[in-house]
Image: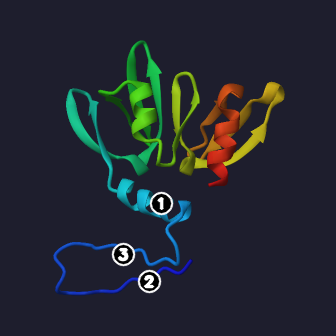
Amino acid sequence: MKVKVVTNDSLNEIEVVVNCPKHDEQVDRIVKAVETSMFNIMGKLRGENYVLNIDDIYYFEAVDNRVFAYCEKEIYEVNYKLHDLSLLLAQTSFLQTARTIVLNIKKIKKVNTLVNGRILAELTNGEKMIITRVYAQSFKTKLRG
């Protein structure tokens, strides 16, 4: 795959064109990645609303019927159900990895296999997450791309 950037002063906004020999799954993944890179979610912190880019979110966690977005330094409450986030972000780098967790696999630094089919993922911020055996196969598939 080649990537080429062409600067054109006459354009008012960024335009992305994908030239390909055939339209296949790889092309669909590229298009979806570009489309979702600008995807934002509203999060609430200390009574104020913030716009969160999904690339800045490490994972979402459901706790006591509330859902939180964990970023590098802050934790924001979001107005979504975990199941809805899992569906909404299905074509992105997010994947449900436990009953209460939807994880951004772009934030994984390394993984280790544990007993009983579970997987330990260490995130780029040093946090450790368990991918339960129920979600391990879909995690491996998504990780392969």
Which of pointers 1 and 3 lies earlier in the amino acid sequence?
A: 3
Residue 49 vertical position relative to residue 29 in the rendered view, above or below: above
Q: In which quarter of the image is residue 37?
A: bottom left
Query: Of residues 106 and 26, which is closer to you in this image?
Result: 26
Within-10-Å neighbours for mark 1: few <14, some 14–19, many 20+: few
Tag 1 near tag 3, CB within 8 Å: no
Residue 100 vertical position relative to residue 137 in the rendered view, above or below: above
| Residue type at the position of mark 2 | Lys
Assign the C terminus to one quadrant of the image.
bottom right
Q: Position of residue 8 (x, y in %)?
A: 25, 87
Q: Quadrant of residue 80?
A: top left
Q: How far apart are the two marked residues, 2 and 1, measured between alpha carbons? A: 18 Å
Q: Is mark 3 on a helix, strand or loop?
A: loop
Q: Position of residue 32 (x, y in %)?
A: 42, 56
Residue 37 vertical position relative to residue 101 in the rendered view, above or below: below
Residue labelled with disc 3:
17
- Residue at (21% x, 35% y) in the render: 49
- Residue at (45% x, 17% y) in the render: 63
Residue labelled with disc 2:
4
Residue labelled with disc 1:
28
